Image (cartoon, rainbow, N blue to C red):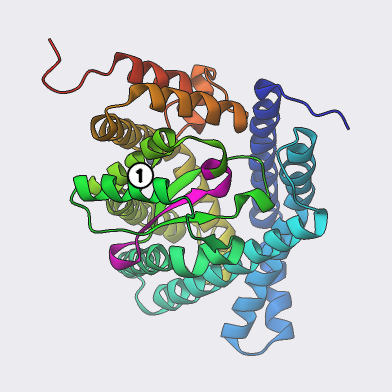
Amino acid sequence: MATHTDPQKYHGMKYRIYFAGLFLDAVLLAVLLFGGLSLALRDYAAGMIGHPWGAGALYILLLAALFSVVHFPLRVFLGYYWEHLFGLSKQSFPQWLTDELKKGVLSLGLSLVLAAVMYSLLASAAQTWWIYTGLFWFALSFVLAKLTPTVIVPLFYKYKDIEDSDLRARIKKLFADARVKLGDVYAIDFSRKTVKANAFICGLGGSRRVVLSDTLIDNYSGPEIATVVAHELGHHCHRDILKMMAINSVLTFSGLYIIDRILTRAVPYFGLNGIADIAGLPLLLLVFSVYSLFLTPLLNAVSCRMETAADRYSLERTGDPQAFISVMEKLGRQNLAEFRPNKWIEWFFYDHPPLAKRIAFAREYRPEGMKK
Ligand SMILES: [Zn+2]
């Protein structure tokens, strides 16, 4: 199979499939709500299991199964076929499917926990359920962020030590210069699954660590990797994970409040037995999806500001714009990134500034004190 290399073609399909997925979700939710399918599923679940909690869980499982079946062909096409067509994935189909199943079980487990808490609150605290649900969501995302490095990442990747002692010394110095105690920088085995390279910071408090893909460590020079680590260090020093969590929580509270207002009015319209009727879940999902969709550009803009600040931090710490530019160019080629995406695409899909902008930023960067 000839490998395709055109980033525009690669991403163009991703955007099309994204909107196809949204369209399918809208159709499914409409059939569930307006076609009476949700009520039928609720009654079926109640007929199968007498206990209301069990019936609620069965309803959620059926709903999840329905969405999974509809989305599965799109996921196979984009996640497996398309990645292979462009020579980016190294996974066999069973390996890819195993990762998908793990993600599915994880999100189903979280959804069941969240739904159990939310529906017991809807049933017992009709006026204030959205406040307590928001608080629970915040606590849950806190625990998840805390567990990401030690529990979630290892579900998909193996940690490796960074063996190159020069590189280790270089990274140590960066941390020491920044007076940051966090000393944990790990490699993960991206190379088993993909040819792409990446780096990220995850965790909260003591669990926080910087993670570099082995595909980055193996193909980039010490000064290049240092600019990437310094960028992640920038996120750490600016407390970006915590800031994003705080912003998300505020938005979650307001989203839940909007759901409360709509749900209360919609009960008679959709034939629900009150706001705590599980058959109203598709309405909740619909409102939340539309709400999130509208917020996406706003969250992207916030994220892009944080990314630019982390880039500036990296340039300040390393004083090496040349290495930074070379990383951006190499990463872009390796990951088939679009250097200059269409501005609407950028507005809706980009939570990092496009590479051409990051490179231009580094070219124009002058250290503090040297600015005129
Ligand atoms: Zn970043």
Coordinates of residue 340 in the picture (x, y in percent): 52, 17
| Residue 122 lies in quadrant | bottom left
- The relative height of residue 183 versus residue 295 in the rendered view (above or below) is below
**Which residue lies under the disc numbered 1?**
232
- The relative height of residue 66 versus residue 237 in the rendered view (above or below) is below
- Tell me, yes or no, if residue 239 can be seen here: no
Q: Residue furthest front?
A: 165
**Would the CB of label 1 be found within 8 Å of ligand 1?**
yes
Nearer to us in this view, 359 or 24: 359
Coordinates of residue 239 in the picture (x, y in percent): 25, 50
- Residue 205 magenta: yes
The quadrant the N terminus occupies is top right
Which residues are the magenta region? 204-217
Picture quadrant of ligand 1: top left
Nearer to us in this view, 202 or 115: 202
The amino acid on which the numbered mark 1 sits, given as a three-letter code, is Glu
> Could you tell me which residue is drawn at 53 percent across and 41 percent down?
216
Answer left or right for 325 relative to 80. Answer: left
> Could you tell me which residue is drawn at 25 percent across and 35 percent down?
317
**Disc 1 packing (10 Å; few <14; some 14–19; many ≥20):** many
